[in-house]
Amino acid sequence: MEHTYEVSIDGHVLTLVALDGQEINPIVVDSVMVHPGERVDFEVTFDQVPDRYWMRSRTIREHVGFDEEADGIIKGTKAIIAYNTATSQGDPATSRKVCSESDVCRVFGCPFPAYPAGDGRQCIHLNDATSTRSQKYLNRKFGIQDDYENVDERFLNFAFVIGSSVKARRLITPRAPLYQDDFSNYTVECTDSLCGYGCKCTHIQELPHKTTVQIVFLSYEPFMTVGAKYLAHHVPHFHGHNFAVMAVGYPPYNETTGQWLGMNPTITCDPETSWRCENPFWTGALPELNTVNPPIKDTVVIPARGYVVVRFKTNNPGYWLLRNQRELPYEEGMAMIFNEAEQKHPKLPKDFPKCYDY
């Protein structure tokens, strides 16, 4: 799947109750953006005039870049929601809500900070979602209250700095299963000499057992100047774990036009690898984290020029893929592998068939 779709039902509001299968406190919106790999549960109260209504799903592409140059390309699909007492037949005659400053449309899941002033649409962000789970449960499962000094922090830049890459590395997938005794002949090691300026390799990072890990996903491309027409948000999906979304940071933007004004200044790209932002760090103090009731997900949207902070505990030994759910960047190498608690990996059964290079 490549695109983001905005879902709505004419004449009705949606009450969001779960994200990626994890319950949240209800959020009432007019529409919800569903990104590749995400799952959204919502409830609808059918209390309008009994009739047939359009349920709409359309791409969010409305302009080229942020310069408000309309291109007229909005693709989507529709379904019919029919009250069981409706007497009309055929296609519904309903229409989308007309958004205005006096009757604002609430939109959940925007991958950008806000719509331009006067647009009539209000973004409801993931930062506004809260888990129904207790703080005690969330801390036990995800370490949401662990002190910063006691977490294993990793910065991962999903960007196009050398093509589709994570931390300036484009994944070459193993040519045989990693669980075999010696997989070195079936992978390409990410050596310093190979990856001095970014590379294509089998990008594997090791994770220790029973540790709270904090990943800072970001989408920074320092060489992209303000006003550039091409920006991209990314959608990492983690196999083997779900995680607590502690914070989402958006880039600064012009409130009148909606145009981005630069990268979020909370994170700085190190001078040595600045153009590819391979080793970023916090500029100053950490951003405020939700240590009370963060939502739980396994797929999350990184805003273009922004970041997402997530936490999880390493309690599931194995090799786990982290990949962009947008298909084209993934196929080009925007993915990596975590080797979690290698000493705890289950042993292969004796005489278990092995699959070598195919």
Image (spheres, rainbow, N blue to C red):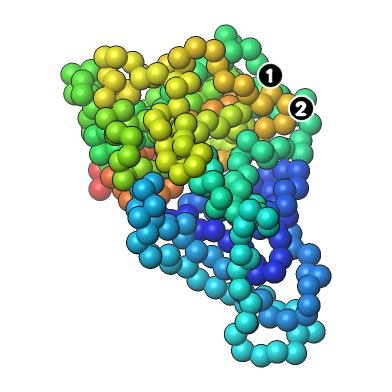
- For disc 2, the neighbor class at 10 Å (few under 14, some 14 to 19, many from 20) is some
Residue 10 lies, with reference to residue 33, above or below; the image says below
**Residue type pointed to by label 2:** Gln
Is 38 on the left or on the right of 179, as rendered? right
Q: Pointer 1: what residue?
A: 145
Residue extending furthest toward the left: 193
* Circle nearer the N terminus (2, 1): 2
Q: Mark 2 and 1 residues: CB-CB less than 8 Å, in contact?
A: yes
Please identify the quarter of the rendering in which residue 57 is found. bottom right
> How far across and how far down the image is residue 152, in percent?
52, 16
Most foreground residue, 17 or 205: 17
State the SS at label 2: helix
Residue 248 lies, with reference to residue 297, above or below; the image says above
Is 256 on the left or on the right of 71, as rendered? right
Res 202 seen here: no
Q: Pointer 2: what residue?
A: 135
**Residue type pointed to by label 1:** Gln
> How far across and how far down the image is residue 263, in percent?
40, 29
Res 230 seen here: yes
Is 290 on the left or on the right of 256, as rendered? right
Name the residue: 24% across, 34% down. Answer: 162
> How far across and how far down the image is residue 54, in percent?
62, 74
**Tag of residue 109:** none
Name the residue: 25% across, 39% down. Answer: 163
Most foreground residue, 56 or 35: 56
